[in-house]
Image: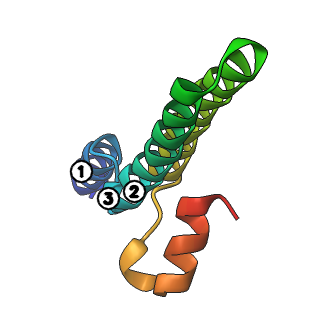
Amino acid sequence: MKASIVAAAAVLLSLAACGGKGDDALGDNAADAAEAKADQLDAMADTASGAEEDALEARADVTREVGEAREEAIDDSDVNADAMSNAQKEAIVKGQ
């Protein structure tokens, strides 16, 4: 009996270490969306100058960092994306 409990606990721990059953694609989508927005800001910065250029580049950097943080948070939360509607997925990707 004790051996089966220990074996079951070992299996559960190994599954937890694998990252669970969540879909990392949702986190990837969030990072990709932030990257696309940051690329737009960089393109705008290319046509600007001075303080406006610096501000746009800084916003692009922050946007990328927020996207990476959102991706990590989504992945860490181990969300079951298959059980979500497209609207729910989109809200998570956009950080709403």
Give the residue at the far bottom of this rendering: 85
Measure the alpha-carbon separation of dots 1 and 3: 25 Å
Q: Up-down: is 89 above or below 95?
A: below
Give the residue at the far right of this rendering: 51
The amino acid sitting under disc 1 is Val
> Which is more foreground, mark 2 or mark 3?
2
| Residue 91 horizontal/vertical position (percent) | 61, 71
Q: Residue, x 39% and y 56% (percent of image)?
A: 29
Task: From the image, tell me which residue sits under label 2.
Answer: 29
Q: Up-down: is 87 above or below 26?
A: below
Task: From the image, tell me which residue sits under label 3.
Answer: 25
Q: Residue, x 66% and y 20% (percent of image)?
A: 53
Measure the alpha-carbon separation of dots 1 and 2: 30 Å
Name the mark on residue 82: none
| Residue 59 horizontal/vertical position (percent) | 67, 30
The amino acid sitting under disc 2 is Asn
**Circle nearer the N terminus (1, 2):** 1
| Residue 67 horizontal/vertical position (percent) | 54, 41
Q: Is residue 39 left or right of residue 6?
A: right
> Which is more foreground, mark 1 or mark 3?
3
